[in-house]
């Protein structure tokens, strides 16, 4: 008698993990593309995580740095203290057993202590520039082209990060060699005094557990955070972002899907970059994201997608 057929084929056989893209439901994706295309670029925005989403997970074979990770204050004592905090809190950040309320408190603690050390250590803007110049951080290939395409179509890109806005901006400046007027960063923003030393942080502290909670609300007072006068036009832009109810969301964690929580979106296409523990995570990523990119894929897929959405638009 034959044993019933078991379905024990490995994930390697189910999906071609050597390929870059996994799409759970190609038809649903096509339907979303049609809906978004029909609504036009004025209804569309892009929301992206920064670390390991816009940037590569590996750079020259080693784990790429984050906006926090690359920062060297030029003062070994403070760098070592921040590193010690990382070693204490990072395992708590990724622990699956700590209840969320408790973890939120711990993350607030970590971020405040780190911010205090940066202030106490007298971080300067020059130190940020030098840190970025010496860092191992790199954008995925195609990020510039993606931003350029979106800029031409006047489509806003919101980058959400629990890292450091000023560092992220410097990374953009040094690595993309230009700024984009459609790209806004929602992250922890520094205040420097006239001597170029960090004196405080602006606005609400954004840590890894609250960044997605009210992400779009955090984007609303964006101009406050940027220290820019809110002119009528800017205010309209903020409203504008909330009215762009079709969205392309990009992240590298399942939690990043919550970045669009503050938006009452109509149609959302989500892209997940699965960078690590691929076999263990592929199922959940495949179910959660419309498109999953593996193998530290470049941004060409996202560019192709937005070109498909709006290439024929004026
Ligand atoms: P995000 O890039 O997903 O928004 O999260 C920021 C990451 O920064 C988070 O995984 C923890 C990390 N981090 C550091 O590496 N050093 C620090 O000092 C702090 C506060 C956070």
Image (cartoon, rainbow, N blue to C red):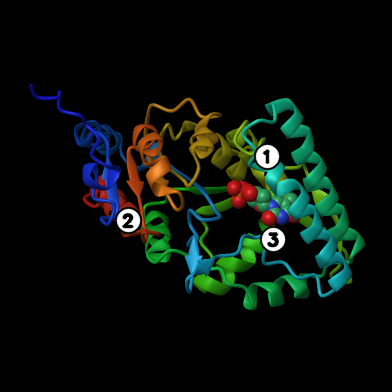
Q: CA distance from mark 1 to mark 2?
A: 29 Å
* Residue that numbered label 2 is attached to: 303
Label pair 1/2, CB-CB below 8 angstroms: no
Q: Is residue 219 left or right of residue 1?
A: right
Relative to residue 213, is residue 47 depicted above or below? below
Label 3: state its secondary structure.
helix
Mark 2 element type: helix
Distance CA(mark 3)–CA(mark 2): 26 Å
Q: Is residue 76 above or below residue 92?
A: below
- Give whichever of discs 3 and 1 has the lower sequence position: 3
Q: Residue at x 62, y 62 (%)?
A: 169
How crowded pointer 2 is (Cα within 10 Å; few <14, some 14-19, many 20+) is rated as many
From mark 3 to mark 1, how far is it between C-alphas?
17 Å
Q: Label 3: how many residues lie within 10 Å, few (<14), some (14-19) or many (20+)?
A: some
Q: Quadrant of the N terminus?
A: top left
Q: Position of residue 155 (x, y in %)?
A: 42, 48
Q: Residue 91: give its label.
A: none
Residue 35 image point, x, y percent: 26, 32
Indicate which disc residue 221 carries: 1
**The quadrant where residue 309 appears:** top left
| Residue at (49, 37) in percent of width and height | 254
In percent of the image, x 53 and y 29: which residue is there? Answer: 261
Q: Which residue is mark 3?
A: 166
| Among the 4 quarters of the image, the one containing residue 71 | bottom right
């Amino acid at each position: 008698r034959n044993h019933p057929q078991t379905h024990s084929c490995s994930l390697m056989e189910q999906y071609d993990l050597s390929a870059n893209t996994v799409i759970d439901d190609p038809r649903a994706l096509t339907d979303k593309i049609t809906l978004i295309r029909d609504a036009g670029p004025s209804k569309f925005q892009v929301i992206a995580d920064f670390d390991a989403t816009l940037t590569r997970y590996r750079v020259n074979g080693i784990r790429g740095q984050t906006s926090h990770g690359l920062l060297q204050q030029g003062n070994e004592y403070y760098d070592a203290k921040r590193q010690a905090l990382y070693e204490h809190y990072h395992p708590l950040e990724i622990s699956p057993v700590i209840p969320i309320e408790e973890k939120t408190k711990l993350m607030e603690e970590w971020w405040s202590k780190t911010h205090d050390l940066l202030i106490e250590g007298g971080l300067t803007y020059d130190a940020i520039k030098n840190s970025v110049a010496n860092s191992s951080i790199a954008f995925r290939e195609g990020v510039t082209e993606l931003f350029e395409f979106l800029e031409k179509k006047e489509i806003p890109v919101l980058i959400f990060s629990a890292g450091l806005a000023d560092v992220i901006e410097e990374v953009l400046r040094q690595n993309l060699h230009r700024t984009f007027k459609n790209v806004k960063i929602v992250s922890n923003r520094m205040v420097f005094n006239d001597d170029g030393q960090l004196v405080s942080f602006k606005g609400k502290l954004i840590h890894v557990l609250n960044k997605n909670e009210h992400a779009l609300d955090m984007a609303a007072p964006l101009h406050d955070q940027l220290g820019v006068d809110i002119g009528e036009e800017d205010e309209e832009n903020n409203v504008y972002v909330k009215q762009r109810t079709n969205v392309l969301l990009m992240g590298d964690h399942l939690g990043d899907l919550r970045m669009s929580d503050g938006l009452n979106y109509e149609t959302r296409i989500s892209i997940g970059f699965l960078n690590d523990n691929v076999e263990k995570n592929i199922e959940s990523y495949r179910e959660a994201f419309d498109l999953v990119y593996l193998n530290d894929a470049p941004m060409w897929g996202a560019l192709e997608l937005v070109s498909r959405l709006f290439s024929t638009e004026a």
